[in-house]
Amino acid sequence: MGRAGILEQVISALARTPRTVLVCGEAGIGKTRLLGEAAAGLPGFRVLRGQARELDGGRAYAPLAGALETLRGEGGETGEALAALEDAIDRAALGATSPAPAALAARLFESLPGPTLIALDDLHLADADTLSVLGALPRRFPWISILGTARTPPSLEVDLAVRLDPLTPAEVAAMVTALLGRTPSDIVLRRVHEASRGNPWFVQEAVLTLLQGGAVRSAVPGPRRGAILSRLFQRDQGGRDLARVLAAVSRTRETAALPELAELAGLPLPTAERAIEGLVRDGVVTRTGEAYALTHPLVAEALYQDLGVVGRREVHGRIAAMLERDGLSGSRRVLEWATHVAESGTPAALPAVLRAAELTRWTAPLSAAHWYGRAAELTSERGELLARQAMAYWKGSRPALALNSAQRALAVLTPGRRHTRTAYTAVGAAHAMGWYEVALDVARRALPEADDPTALFAQRALIDAELGRPSQEAARRGWEGLADCPPEDRVITAGCLALHALIEGDWPLTQKALDDLLAFAAALPPGARLASLESAAHVLTIAGVRTRAVELLDQAEQIHRGLGWHDIAGQHVRTTAVLRRLGGEWARALEEIAPAESALADAGLLENRALLRNIELDILLDQGRYDEAARVLAEPPPECALQVGLRCVSRARLALGRGDHATARRELDRAAAFGVPEVLHRALAVRVLLHAATRDAQACVATAARLDEVSADGTPRAVMAAHIAVGWACRDRDRAGAALELARADGLPFEEARARLVLGVLGDRSQLPRAHATFDRLGAAPWRTIAERHLRAAGLPVEPSGDLTPSERRVIELVAGGLSNPQIAEELHYSRKTVEVYLTRVYAKTGFRSRVELALAVERGEL
C-alpha cells in the first residue's frame, strides 16, 4: 500500500552487493512483508531467512543459526561447512575445545556460490554477537547483502535505513476495500483508521472483527490488543491454553510440534488436534510442515501478556523441564533451556544462568555478559558476577558497558585478587574511551587496596606518558614487579610498559617488554595468548615494523578461529590498517578504515578511533588529497598530549602541502612543545621537508641532525625517517642506502620509494624511474610530481608503470613465474629476440634492472 517506491529503493540497494539495509517501523507496519517482497525481487540471489526472538539476548548467534537452517540438506562444501558449524556450537555445550562459531560461519559463507541475501526479522531483539558478525560480513564477503527489520535501530552500521510510516486515511480505505471486496461507509473507514492508527496489521484485525460482528471501540492500544484476543477467545478453553503455550514457546523458537504443545498445555492429543485446527481456521496459527507458529508477533505478544506473571512463570518452567527431560545435547538447546529456567523464577534459575554464562564466555563474550548480568540480578552476592560481566564486555569491545559493570563490582568487592583484576579492567576501558582522568582516578583509588599493584602502575605510566606528564616512577614500579606479578597481570603489565617505552622513544626497552610479553604468552591460555599477540603486533606497527607484526597477527588469527572473538578495544582493526599502510595497500586501507572508524565510534573506542584516523591522514596527505584530510582534521582528537601532538603534525603536513609555510611552522612548534618523543621525531621529519621547501639548506641540515640525535634509540620508523632526512639534507648516499635496505627488508614500498628518490637525486639516476613507478602505483601524487621533476632534470622519460602494455604485463607475469626467455617465447609464440625487446622496455619503464628484481616487485605487489 503506497510503498512501491520504498520496495524499489531497497531492492536496488541490495542488488549492489555488499550492502546492509535496515527497515524500521512499529510492529504490524509491514516490515516483514516488505522483507519478503524484497527477497523475492532479487533473482539469482540465495536467500537465507531468519528471525530474532524475544529472549535471544543471551542465545549467541541464534538468528544466524535460524537463517542457516535454509542450507540444511545441501551437499558438497556448503553442507560440510554447515555441519562443522553446528557441531562446533553443540560441542561447546559439553566443554570441548572447537573452532569458534563465528569463524566457522565465515567459512560457511565463503563456500556459498553467487550472491547471497541474509534476511533477518526483528533485529532489535538480536544478541550482540550476531550483530557483531553481521557488521563484519559485508566487509569480508563482497557477494553478501543483509536485509533486516527492527522496531528500533540496533547497533549495526547500515548503508540504507528506511522507516515505514503509518498508512494515510486514503491508503487505509484502499486496504479495507480490498479486504472486504466493497467500500464501506466513511464512518466505518474513519473508525478503522482511528483504531488502527494507520497500522496495516491492525487494519486487518479491525476488518476481521467487523466481519465477526464486533466493533472497534477505541483508538488506544488496549482495545487494539482486545481486537486480537476477541477473535481468539471465541475458541474454547483448550484453544486458548494451546495458543498461550505457543506464545511462550515462540519466545525462543519459531515453531513447535503439536505433541509438545499438547503436553505443555495439559491437553490430550485428540483435544489438541481439534483446538489447533480451529486456531488455524481463525488465522491465529499457521502450519509449517509438521509444526505450528503464531501468525504475527503481535498475536504472540497479546497472548503472552494475557498469561499474567504467574502463568508465564509456570509455562516457562514446564518448557524448561521438557527440554531437560529430552536431553541438553548441544549449546543451542542448553541456552534455550537456561532462558526458560531464568524466566520461570525458580531457585534453579541461578545455576542455569551461570551454566549459560560459562558456556558462552569463550565463543560469544557479549552473550556471556548478558548471562552474568542476569545472574547478578538473582543473588545478593553479585560482586564476582559483575566483575565477570565487565571482563566479558571488555572482550566484546564494549568499553562503556565494561566500565559500568566494573565500577559497580568495585563498589561491593572486598580487596583481593578479583578486586585488582576488575580495577585494571576498568582502567583499560576508560583509557580506550579517551577518559584519561577517569582511568587515572580508578587506578589511584585501587592501588592502596591492590593485592599486586604492578599492572595498575604500568597502566598509570602509559596514560601519564600519553598526557605528557611525568611517568618514569610509575614505569619503574611496573618494571620492578613484572617478573613476579600474577600470570594474568603480566600480559597487561608488559603490554603497557612496551607502549610506554615506545612513546618515550626508547626502542631497546620497548623490545625488552615485547620479548617478555611474547615469551610469557606461549604458556598462557588461548584467550590471554591472543590478547598478547595482538598487543605485540599493535606496538610493532606503531614502531613501523611490518614483517614481524604480520607474523604475530597470523598466529593470533589461528587462535581467533578457536575462540570467535578478538579485536579487544579495536586494537586488531587498527593494527591491520597500519599494516596495509606500511605494505602499500593504501586503497584497501582507506576502504576498510571508513566502516571500522564508524564501528569504533559507535562502541565508544575513541582512543583507537583517533589512531585509526591518524593512519587515514597519513595516506590522504601522502596522496595529496588535502580537502579530505582537512575534513578529518576538523574532528577534535581525545584530549591528551600524544593525540593532539600527532594532529598538530598532520595539520603541519597539510599546510606544507598547500604552500602555507607559516602555518606549518606554527603547528610544528605546537607539536614539539608537548615534549612527547613519539611526536617529536615525526615533527622533526616534517620540519626537514619544510626547510627544503623554503630552500633553507642550513636549517635543513641542522634539523636532520637533531632528528638523527633524538632517533638514536628510537623506533625503526624514527630511524628510517632519520636516514632519509640525513640522506636528503646532507647528501649522504650511505644513509639513503641504509634506508633503502631497511625498507626492502621489511617490505615497505613507500619508504623504499622515498629512499630511491633520494639516491636518484644524489646521482644514481636508475633509481628515479623505480621511485616514480611506486609513487604512481600508490597514488602518492605530491611525491610522484617530485620524482617527475627529477626525472626530467636527469633527461629521463616519464613513463609510469600504468603505461605498461598488456603484452609487457604478461611477460612480467611469466618472468615472476620463473620462466626463462626461451620458455616465455614458446608460451607466447614469440621469437626470443621479441622477448628480449619486451624485457628491455619493461626495465626502462619500471626502473628495475634484473629478472630477480621484477619477480620481487610482483611479489610485493608493485607491479
Image (cartoon, rainbow, N blue to C red):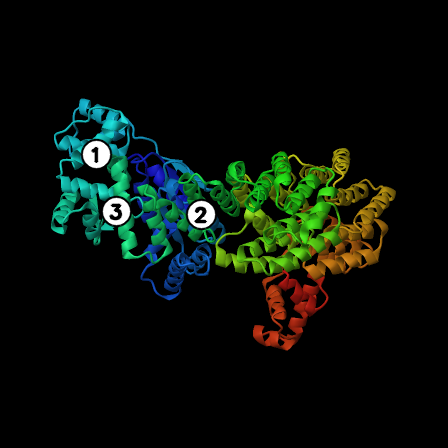
State the residue position of label 1.
228
Please tell me which of labels 2 and 1 falls first in the chain: 1
**x, y (%) of residue 650?**
69, 40
State the residue position of label 3.
318
Badge nearest the viewer, 3 or 1? 3
Which secondary structure, mark 3?
helix
Q: How many marks?
A: 3
Q: Give the CA separation, mark 2 to mark 3.
A: 25 Å
Which secondary structure, mark 2?
helix
State the residue position of label 2.
368
Amino acid type, mark 3: Arg
The answer to whether 645 appears left or right of 195 in the picture is right
Question: Which residue occupies the extreme right position in the image?
Answer: 698
Q: Quadrant of residue 797?
A: bottom right
Which quarter of the image is occupied by the N terminus? Answer: top left
Please tell me which of labels 3 and 1 falls first in the chain: 1
**x, y (%) of residue 411?**
53, 36
Q: Give the CA separation, mark 3 to mark 1.
A: 26 Å
Residue at x 54% of width, y 58% of height: 525
Badge nearest the viewer, 2 or 1? 2
Q: Are marks 2 and 1 in contact (CB under 8 Å)?
A: no
Name the residue nearer the viewer: 636 or 783: 636
**x, y (%) of residue 295?**
24, 42
Please tell me which of labels 2 and 3 falls first in the chain: 3
Name the residue nearer the viewer: 842 or 260: 260
Q: Give the CA separation, mark 2 to mark 1.
A: 37 Å
Amino acid type, mark 1: Ile
Q: Are marks 2 and 3 in contact (CB under 8 Å)?
A: no
